[in-house]
Amino acid sequence: MPHHDARRRLLGRSGELEALERLLREVREGRSRVLVLRGEAGVGKSALLGRLAERAADVQTVYAAGVEAESEFAYSALQRLCAPLLSHLDRLPPVQQEALRVAFGLSAGSAPEMLLVGLAVLGLFAEAAAGSPLVCLVDDAQCLDLMSQRILAFVGRRLDAESVALVFAERTVGGERGEGLAGLPELIVRGLADADARALLDSALAAPVDARVRDRIVAETGGNPLALLELPRGLSPVELAFGFGRPGAGPLATRVEDGFRRRVEALPADTRALLLVAAVEPVGDAPLLWRALRLLGIGSEAAAPAEAAGLISLGAPVRFRHPLVRSAVWRGADAAALRAAHHALAEATDAGRDPDRRAWHRAHAAVGPDEKVAAALERSADRALARGGRAAAAAFLERAAALTPGPRERARRALAAASAHLAAGVPARVPDLLAAAELGPLDPLQTADASRLRAKASSMTSPGLGAVQPLLDAAGRLMDLDPAAARETCLAAFGAAIWAGRYDGGGLRRAAEAARGLPPGDETAGVFLRALVTWSTDGPAAAFPLLARALRSLTRDEDLAVLWPAANAAVELGDLRAWLDITGRAVRFARTTGALSVLSTALPYRAASLVYAGRFAEARDLLAEAPAAGDAAGAATRMVSTALLSAYQGRERPALELIGAMEREGEQRGLGRLTGMAACARAVLHNGLGSYPLAMEAALRGVEYQDLVVHHWTCGELVEAATRAGRPEIAALARERLSDWGRAGTPWALGAQAVADALAGAPERAEDRYREAVDHFARGGLGAYEARTRLLFGEWLRRQNRRSQARGELHAAHAAASAMGMEAFAERARRELLATGETVRARTPGPPVLTAQEARIARLAATGHPNAEIGSQLFLSPRTVEWHLRKVFAKLGVSSRREIEGALAGR
């Protein structure tokens, strides 16, 4: 790590140094800590990392830095960070060993999913730290390759009790943070205080300057240590008097970089060439550097001026004094010099050991189109895909397309690059690449595929309004060329239309018309498509048999591509058990394979199903686990499930904040489903709180449009709210709508219809219908609805002056709602019990409460899962699981896993 001027640059950093000392102390005590040092270029982040490395000399330390020239190589920084730890690889579960070996190119195999590689890295860190604490230092995190950044962020969010420190230094520009490490604990590194800045400046000046000039320089640099040390170099007191902040001088980092560039320009030509080759060689490989320099006819004597100027250290590895030196060298070189440097590095790189870097250097050395270089890049893309590096494959293919001389091959490679960017979850590059592909001759299938890719890229960023028609157009182009792909694309269009909801009233009709024109198919997507066509055109009741058939066809994990329609079909039918089964299989599949694209949607869908099952603690755990980095639809689903849980918990202020955010998001992005779900959640919240006019108002807004799934839920809320608000005519209309749902014949649908009949139907049948509803909900596993129905039944019995019977139902409702965490409904039951003359005991403080993480681990341990399996499910290291279990045992007062289940039940 670079240490030039480090001690001077740490002047005035007592607060930051104290924070790092505290972090190191906690890691030595057995805890794990993550920290992102953020600040502008030159503010001292690298110096702080260097001091941390010095203070951690008694423990293991590994280091890697992001390099802009290497940001297209998948796992490059991660592999450098993990390389010293690979002796611990054999201790990981075999599937994780294989994932890491394939990702690092150490062996061949199926491309691993990102989350599986992340879990392997987490386990590797934990195993390495088993004997001695581990400190991982990552400099210039803003330049990390995408896969390294994502995986290290994942690991950072999962570290807990492994004795591991993971510390990043990330450059900010204009105070803007990068998205990749968002949410991790941070320490903002700012400029020095004035007194410290003046002292540092004085140490850098060749001669004293006037105090007013000095103060102005301190103000213009904002106390940035690198600027204070570098900008005065070579300037006389007279020149300094004019200051650094003249108009048009540009950002501070640019001015420091310009200072480095001027110093580079003053060096001999061979020294400048040496610096340039070092700048475009990303990993600091000294033997490779010297081989390339020999090809350029440059000897070792060229190094001395650069080292004397303090710009570079030519050790093993080669290190620039600061990343701004590298960028100053790079940006200051002309195109011919850059091509010569890349050519020398390509020739010096062993084609057998590192074909990808050789191909990359050859590409940058090319003057114009070159089919041999383009073909080599395409082979590199294939290798990157085999290791799970979709973003790297996309970059290789994009460069290959640019270098392809033939228009047909250029179009094919541009199309492949667009597809790879989409698979990597980076849709922003897709439109430009498709435009380039369409300049060349495309056959009809390629043209249709380009249309599909463009529509899918648009729907990834905006899944509702505006996404429907492009997907339908793409399905139409694929109809005769690839019928199965056409049906899948049309199914995606249905999804977009359902998300658009009330903001695109004709979307479902257009999707149904388009689907009817497609060749029928018996694959799962085709069956779901027919069911949705019927639902859209003939109504829900007519679609129930088709939806049930589609669910029965969902028997294999590979059918999880249709997770979204499958889960919604189950809920539309009112089949909670099927909903739980589908989402449970999806979550297990995603956890086993590390499929982030499945997990980001599966977790919030499962959380919603658990809410209706009355398993709030599990739902809360899953929402906490749900990755924030999913696609737009996954993020919207997470918002829905979180708001629904909060509404059922009855916590008014946080619930209203979440619901308000949903309403704004729905309106701004044209996601009518969010708007409808927000209305339903608002109605649930106000029904729980007993604010029936507000609940009725919200539910009426919700039922203005028939959203798939949501409509039935909201009608149920409307019947209860309107009845209690004294509007029987509104309740009757909502009850009539629910009668169609009853034709699905499932416990949920039958129970909802029975409750509506009890509230708004014939009074003489109310008692029977309440009892039937309780039975239906109990049979269907709908704990939340069963508790609410017992509450309604108890309220009805009290109003019939049947106090003794009312107490039985109200006690059951109160106990169930309290146990689940339905606080507002529990309070309603308590008030009703008081009205019957019953004394309700205050809840007494119990034993220490398990945290959400401890509760999840306890439940899994109680069912016999070993630590390694628990860790795989929850994306934790086995050592963290063991640490949490010790706390669980202490809190529950047990000494073995066999006792956990009984202790949990006793709570």
Image: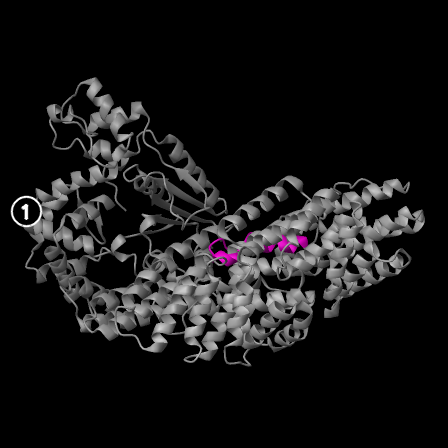
- Magenta stretch containing residue 561, yes or no? no
| Numbered range of the magenta stretch | 616-634
Left or right for 728, reference 398: right
Residue shown at the point (77%, 43%) measured from the top left: 827
Q: Is residue 108 above or below residue 639?
A: below
Image location of residue 769, percent across then percent down: 85, 60
Residue shown at the point (17%, 44%) measured from the top left: 311
Left or right for 151, reference 206: right
Q: Is residue 337 above or below residue 251?
A: below
Residue 872 visible here? no
Image location of residue 905, percent across then percent down: 75, 55
Image location of residue 185, percent across then percent down: 45, 43
Q: Which residue is mark 1?
A: 268
Image location of residue 413, percent across then percent down: 28, 71
User: Residue type at mark 1?
Assistant: Pro
**Which type of secondary structure does the marked residue at label 1 adopt?**
loop
Determine the residue located farthest toward the top in the rendered image: 211
